[in-house]
Image: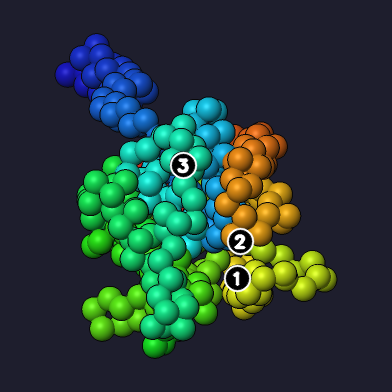
Amino acid sequence: MKLQHPFKSPTAILAVTALLAACGATPPPAVVAPLPPLPPVKVRVGLALGGGAAKGFAHIGVIKMLEANGISPDVVSGTSAGSVVGSLYASGMDAFALQERAFSLDQSSVRDVSLLSGGLVKGQKLQDFVNQLVNNRPLEKLNKPFAAVSTELETGNRAVFVRGNTGQAVRASSSIPGVFEPVLISGKHYVDGGVVSPVPVDAAKQLGADFVIAVDISAKANGKAPGSMVSIVTQSIAIMGQKLGEQELARADVIIRPKVGQIGPSDFDQKNQAILEGERATLAAMPEIKKRLEEKRQQLIYKQLSARTPAVKVQ
């Protein structure tokens, strides 16, 4: 009997053809579950308000223009005069309510001189004034997270108040050495935060800010001798904290510097001019603020995308 070559049989040919076809077939595409959409990216904006006594009215103008341009800070930090404005803003007042309060404010509302302490301002009236306006709410119950920055007298360390008596924290932050009595809180004495943190950028970051707008109204040495005792003290504090302040300001995303150098620390009658200078400086800085805000938003988007896309490991 003649044997047929195995690869010439019809059955073998069909089998080989089917095998070759199977080897060359395109595999079915893998089913990949779509990733859930990214949540909307919100840049958490912090507002750091610096110290400067009566110059602090400029902060109201800054807030006014930020709000007018659709920028509502999520967290607020303040030093000295910045803590006064910052606490009221964090309590829920808008810029126009702040301006209304400013026009009705005079030095007698916040100054109570004590002859027993060498003529220093006690600060109790300032504490009561702030507590009345925030409806006696503690710091942690304000509408926005807020931090008041002070200086611990015993150690020279920066103190950041985020809980407790709002008026007392503002009083501690605003207690200019040699003008106000140090404030006693839990066995420690506190004085003006401008000694260690003239513009509290780091405190705003501690509150969770992604993007910090700093407002610098500190007195600058101009070659002229200050004309009053309060001016001498406030300018001395500004000089002491200048180097620390420069380092901290470098960590801000945008710095607004209202032109309030001509306004003295006790010039409450120039509050309208200070507010106007705050408005002008903020409007001038607005293009940069919007540009940098968008850059920060893009960075946060990229960070989110990177976190959910695993890196490819090269063998």
Identified at 73% across, 55% down, the residue is 262
**163 or 225: nearer the eye?**
225
**Residue under numbered circle 2:** 265
Q: In 3D space, how far apart are the residues under numbered discs 3 and 2 (Cα atoms)? A: 18 Å
**121 or 11: nearer the eye?**
121
The answer to whether any part of residue 22 appears in the image is: no
Q: Earlier in the sequence, mark 1 or mark 3?
A: 3
Do the residues bearing badges 1 and 2 touch, measured as CB atoms within 8 Å?
yes
Which of the numbered marks, if any, corresponds to residue 230?
1
* Amino acid identity at mark 2: Pro
**194 or 5: nearer the eye?**
194
SS of the residue under disc 1: helix
Left or right side of 150 for 20 = left
Q: In 3D space, how far apart are the residues under numbered discs 1 and 2 (Cα atoms)? A: 7 Å
Which of the numbered marks, if any, corresponds to residue 104?
3
* Amino acid identity at mark 1: Val
* Amino acid identity at mark 3: Ser
